[in-house]
């Protein structure tokens, strides 16, 4: 069967069906399609042609989605950026990307205010359906251009998104996972509900009011929901909510177990896979209970292998760097702009994640290779320390990384979001039943501001600021 163009997504569904809900804005598929076609006409007028990269920085909402599909209609590739990004950071990314056009909210508003006719005719299909950016913890920008064209087989699905359902995508749409979820939800005829920014109680209110069946979240969001009093959580009617899919960062085992205890094992699913698309692993709560901590096994014919630092094959259960081979073969799923591939033997690739596999081939993550803290000769994975800190009732979110230490080489430092004056000795006493002493933070920085963004990401600060408590 011939693949269907993403450009035709909005016109394939009932024009009266609700497509996007954001705050007080509610657009049907017909209204969203009309808006996209007007923006597509503007893009073509601005010189956008087939396979161009079109960068844009818009907040979550209908205009973001309308512009993304307008780019498909113009035969180009959407490259979303954060609307909150500092100008200097945005310019660095644009210099690396060199898109044919950059658009912001002002540009879109002006384009929609004009009376230009909508774009008509059969759209051409771009060679890539998305180009997402990443700076990692270093801030060095790179662009990841997907290797798949902007057309898919009609039966194509994406991580259990329902057809003709109602889904919540509360994360920032410029990130790969929320962007992909929103596009494929609309592809499947589902209504997409988005948020300006994530708030736990507001999210539950939306799930109740909009009869949400499926939601994509990151562990930070799920921790914030579980931090609400049980009575507050259970005051909402969540009977329609069948599935939550979490991704983007490791989830603490205790948090996942708490979620299973609350919503049941068939409710929670996890997807692991980088933007590069080398491999995707998938596991449900019931399967996870048999293998706590696993992110599942590769889907389809993709394969993984674990290698030691010297390039030799790690033993079963031994932690090493995760290399993957996509089902379509080496070098097929993406291309970088501004970075080099991390290739190993015979074209196998890594994005820097560490982990191990068990006898049945289930993958267990450790952390990012670049995030490993070697303190006094001891290997410390930040994710393990973060999972323990998040157990403290005063902690809303946190991030752990290594800082230089004269004696140990590196020491564990934690940035903690809390509304209390949490002191290092108190935290140490709390952690003593969860972590060995060598893994405890030797310094902490407390803040009332969110430590991680709504995509669960944290960028290491160049300096340690505000209230910092150091170990004596």
Image: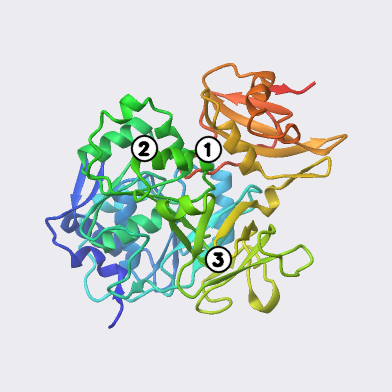
Nearer the N terminus, badge 1 or badge 3? 3
Residue 51, percent across and down? 43, 72
Q: Which mark is residue 120?
A: none
To which residue does mark 3 refer? 360
Q: What is the quadrant of residue 184 in the picture?
A: bottom left
Distance from label 1 to label 3 (Cα)? 34 Å
Which-is-in-front pick, marks 2 and 1? 2
Closest to the observer, 123 or 322: 322
Image height check: is 420 above or below 18?
above
**Visible in this render: residue 54?**
yes
- Tell me, yes or no, whether the two marked residues, 1 and 3, touch with CB atoms within 8 Å: no
Distance from label 3 to label 2 (Cα)? 29 Å
> Which class describes the residues within 10 Å of circle 3: few (<14), some (14-19), or many (20+)?
few
Q: Which mark is residue 452?
A: 1
Quadrant of the rendering where the N terminus is positioned:
bottom left
Closest to the observer, 416 or 67: 416
Identity of the residue drawn at 64% across and 68% down: 341
In screen coordinates, is 27 left or right of 156?
A: left
In screen coordinates, is 319 left or right of 164?
A: right
Residue 8, percent across and down? 25, 69
What is the secondary structure assignment of the residue under circle 1? Answer: loop
To which residue does mark 2 refer? 262
Identity of the residue drawn at 88% across and 34% down: 407
What is the secondary structure assignment of the residue under circle 2? Answer: helix
Q: Residue pushed farthest right? A: 407
Quadrant of the rendering where the C terminus is positioned:
top right
Which-is-in-front pick, marks 3 and 2? 3
**Visible in this render: residue 467?**
no
Nearer the N terminus, badge 3 or badge 2? 2
> Which class describes the residues within 10 Å of circle 2: few (<14), some (14-19), or many (20+)?
some
Residue 417, percent across and down? 55, 27
What is the secondary structure assignment of the residue under circle 3? Answer: loop
């Amino acid at each position: 069967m011939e693949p269907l163009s993403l450009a035709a997504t909005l016109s394939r569904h009932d024009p009266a069906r609700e497509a996007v809900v954001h705050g007080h804005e509610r657009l049907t598929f017909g209204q969203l399609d009309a808006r996209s076609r007007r923006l597509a006409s503007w893009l073509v007028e601005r010189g956008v042609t087939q396979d161009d990269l079109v960068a844009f920085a818009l907040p979550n909402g209908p205009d973001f989605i309308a512009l993304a599909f307008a780019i498909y209609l113009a035969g180009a590739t959407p490259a979303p950026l954060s609307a909150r990004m500092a100008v200097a950071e945005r310019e660095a990314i644009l210099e690396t990307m060199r898109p044919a056009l950059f658009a912001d909210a002002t540009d879109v508003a002006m384009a929609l205010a004009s009376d230009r006719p909508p774009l008509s005719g059969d759209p051409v299909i771009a060679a890539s359906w998305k180009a997402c950016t990443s700076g990692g913890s270093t801030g060095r920008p790179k662009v990841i251009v997907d290797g798949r064209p902007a057309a898919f087989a009609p039966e194509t699905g994406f991580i259990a998104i329902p057809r003709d359902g109602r889904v919540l995508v509360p994360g920032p749409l410029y990130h790969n996972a929320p962007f992909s979820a929103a596009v494929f939800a609309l592809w499947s005829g589902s209504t997409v509900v988005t948020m300006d920014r994530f708030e736990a109680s507001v999210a539950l209110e939306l799930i109740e009011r909009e009869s949400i069946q499926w939601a994509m979240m990151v562990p930070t969001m799920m921790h914030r929901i579980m931090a609400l009093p049980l009575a507050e959580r259970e005051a909402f009617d969540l009977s329609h909510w069948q599935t939550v899919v979490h991704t983007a960062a490791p989830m603490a085992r205790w948090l996942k177990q708490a979620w299973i205890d609350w919503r049941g094992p068939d409710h929670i699913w996890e997807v692991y896979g980088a933007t590069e698309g080398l491999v995707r692993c998938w596991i449900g709560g019931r399967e996870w209970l048999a293998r706590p901590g696993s992110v599942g096994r590769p889907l389809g014919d993709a394969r993984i292998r674990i290698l030691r630092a010297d390039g030799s094959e790690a033993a079963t259960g031994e932690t090493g760097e995760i290399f993957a081979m996509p089902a379509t073969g080496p070098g097929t799923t993406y291309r970088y702009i501004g970075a080099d591939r991390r290739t190993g033997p015979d074209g196998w690739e890594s994005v820097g994640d560490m982990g191990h596999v068990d006898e049945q081939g289930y993958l267990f993550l450790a952390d990012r290779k670049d995030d490993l803290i070697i303190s006094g000769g001891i290997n410390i994975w930040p994710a393990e320390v973060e999972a323990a800190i998040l157990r403290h009732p005063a902690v809303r979110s946190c991030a752990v990384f290594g800082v230089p230490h004269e004696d140990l080489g590196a020491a564990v430092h934690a940035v903690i979001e809390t509304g209390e004056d949490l002191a290092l000795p108190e935290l140490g006493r709390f952690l003593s039943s969860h972590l060995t002493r060598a893994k405890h933070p030797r310094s902490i920085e407390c803040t009332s501001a969110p430590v991680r963004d709504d995509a669960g990401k944290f960028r290491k600060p160049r300096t340690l600021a505000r209230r910092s408590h150091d170990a004596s």
